[in-house]
Amino acid sequence: MSDIKTYSDTYLYQKYPIYTKKLTDAIMRDPVIEKNADTFSDVEYVVKKARISDSLVNILKSRNVILLACEDPLPRAFKVFAARDMKSKDRALRIFIDCTGVITKSKTSMDYTVNESKLLSYLLSAGVTMAYHKDASMITRRSALVTGSTEAFAKCFTFIIDYLTKVSIQESSKVKVMYLSSMYFLIGQLGLDESRAQPIAKKIAGISEREATMLDMLLEKYSVPKGGNTRDHSPYENIKVFVSALREVMHFNAKTISVDIVVERWMHSYGVGTVFALEYFPAFSAMMTDAYIGGYLNSQKTIEKVCGSTMVQYSKDAIDFVSSLA
């Protein structure tokens, strides 16, 4: 298993340097919601009452989870993020949650108003994010999480490619995109070795051994820049490399398929807050579980339509996983 990918490792994050400033400013400048205050028990009660998982209360109260009362709301893609706590002596990794519009103190009293569905969604995302950064193998050892998330991603990605190219007209072409997008997710996001990824991707796509082997060879060929070395370059390195290689393998028109076009269509279909789901596992997991909780944080109806029962089952497995961490 390769090293885990963080936000800053992604192509999309590196493309917009302003993200680092926004997150740093939030950590250093924005007020923190005091969990030891007597009135905070009202927030705990909301989480307990939902009865999704007792572990969500533990996540809420954890010293490793910092609730920010952001003066300027963070972009939708960064409502939950992992970062070093630059204000602490140990500079430990913490999970930060932008609680703007989620946990709001009354102007006339010390009481809090809580947006239940958003808070539950963010806490579940925080649990998965912390586990991923603490020891990603806790996630990758669970076959249900691996298979469920991969199948959901492949469905979401293939839906976008189908919209742009009508690939589903020919079933064999759709199967190829399902296979390659599964491989991209398993290796590029979950960090699995090809030997473990291939059987999972083949089963999800329903592709033959021969076709899969041919696609692997072609993808490797088209992902290496001229003069490059295949050993130093992976077709699953980031979303830009993958989309470029996919276009060549599938013989898509460059005017129809490019990384910018795919990203734009993804955000239009699933919501701007899901953009990092294309490269970063906790973001994709949150895209699924947010839809399951039902807070309409993103384009929930489209996600439900595209993923169907796969989204539901993955979310249930994610809740069970987070519960096991308690």
Image: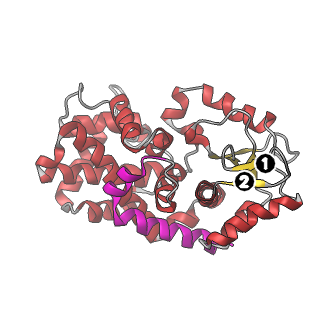
Residue 1: percent from the left, percent from the top? 51, 57
Which numbered disc flags the more N-terminal residue, 1 or 2? 1
- Residue shown at the point (81%, 55%) measured from the top left: 111
Q: Please rate how many residues cluster around mark 1, counting C-alpha atoms within 10 Å: few if below 14, some from 14 to 19, many from 20.
A: some
C-alpha distance separating marks 1 and 2: 6 Å
In this view of the protein, which residue sits in the foreground, 274 or 241? 274
Residue 126: percent from the left, percent from the top? 64, 56
Q: Is residue 233 left or right of residue 221?
A: right
Q: Is mark 2 on a helix, strand or loop?
A: strand
Amino acid type at image mark 2: Thr
- Read off the magenta span: 298-326
Circle number at residue 105: 1
Amino acid type at image mark 1: Lys
- Residue shown at the point (17%, 58%) measured from the top left: 210
Q: Is mark 1 on a helix, strand or loop?
A: strand
Residue 113: percent from the left, percent from the top? 72, 53
Quarter of the image with the C terminus in it: bottom right
How many numbered dots are placed on residues in this image? 2
Q: Please rate how many residues cluster around mark 2, counting C-alpha atoms within 10 Å: few if below 14, some from 14 to 19, many from 20.
A: some
Q: Can residue 269 be seen in this view?
A: yes
Q: State the residue lying farthest toward the front.
A: 108
In this view of the protein, which residue sits in the foreground, 235 or 109? 109
In this view of the protein, which residue sits in the foreground, 312 or 8? 312
Q: Provide the residue designation for mark 2.
A: 113
Circle number at residue 139: none
Mark 1 in CB contact with mark 2 (< 8 angstroms)? yes
